[in-house]
Image (spheres, helix red, strand yellow):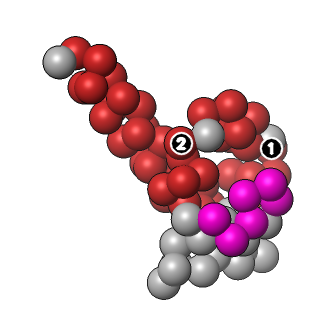
Amino acid sequence: MEIVNSTAGTMPFGKHKGHLLEEVARDRAYCRWLFKQPHFKSGYPDLYKVLRELAELERFMREARISY
């Protein structure tokens, strides 16, 4: 069962519990680890999708800053 605080956009569990998803997406090592966990995608599909998109946006922004 998925529990996501969609109005506040906060992480519902783990090391970053209560942190904004935008902050969680900045922790690249944690996101890499989390995305590899088999239960994450199947147990939290909405959270997986949002965090994946935020991590991708964070990567894009980081690369854009390096380019300038």
Left or right for 12, reference 39? left
Q: Residue furthest bottom?
A: 7
**Residue 4 vertical position relative to residue 58 in the rendered view, above or below:** below
Label number found at residue 38: 1
| Residues packed near mark 1 inside 10 Å, few (<14), some (14 to 19) or many (20 plus) | few
Locate the N terminus by quadrant.
bottom right
Q: Residue at x 60, y 33 (%)?
A: 28
Residue placed furthest toward the top: 67
Q: Which residues are magenta?
A: 14-19
Identified at 68% across, 31% down, the residue is: 29
* Residue 44 as seen in the image, left or right of residue 21: right
SS at circle 1:
helix
Based on the displayed image, in which of its 4 quarters is residue 62 positioned?
A: top left
In the displayed structure, 45 sits above or below 4; it is above
Instruction: Please identify the quadrant where the C terminus is shown.
Output: top left
Apparent side of residue 60 relative to residue 7 in the rendered image (left or right): left
Q: Nearer the viewer, mark 2 or mark 1?
A: 2
Residue 41 placement (x, y as % from top left)? 68, 52
Report which residue position mark 2 lands on.
26
**Magenta-colored stretch includes residue 66:** no
How packed mark 2 is, by other alpha carbons closer than 10 Å (few <14, some 14-19, many 20 or more), is some
Q: Earlier in the sequence, mark 2 or mark 1?
A: 2
Write the residue at 72% across / 58% down.
Answer: 16
Which quadrant would residue 45 be assigned to in this image?
A: bottom right
Residue depicted at x 60% and y 80%: 5
Give amino acid for label 2: Arg
Instruction: Give coordinates of residue 61: x percent, y percent.
Output: 31, 34
Residue 25 position, x and y percent, is 54, 47
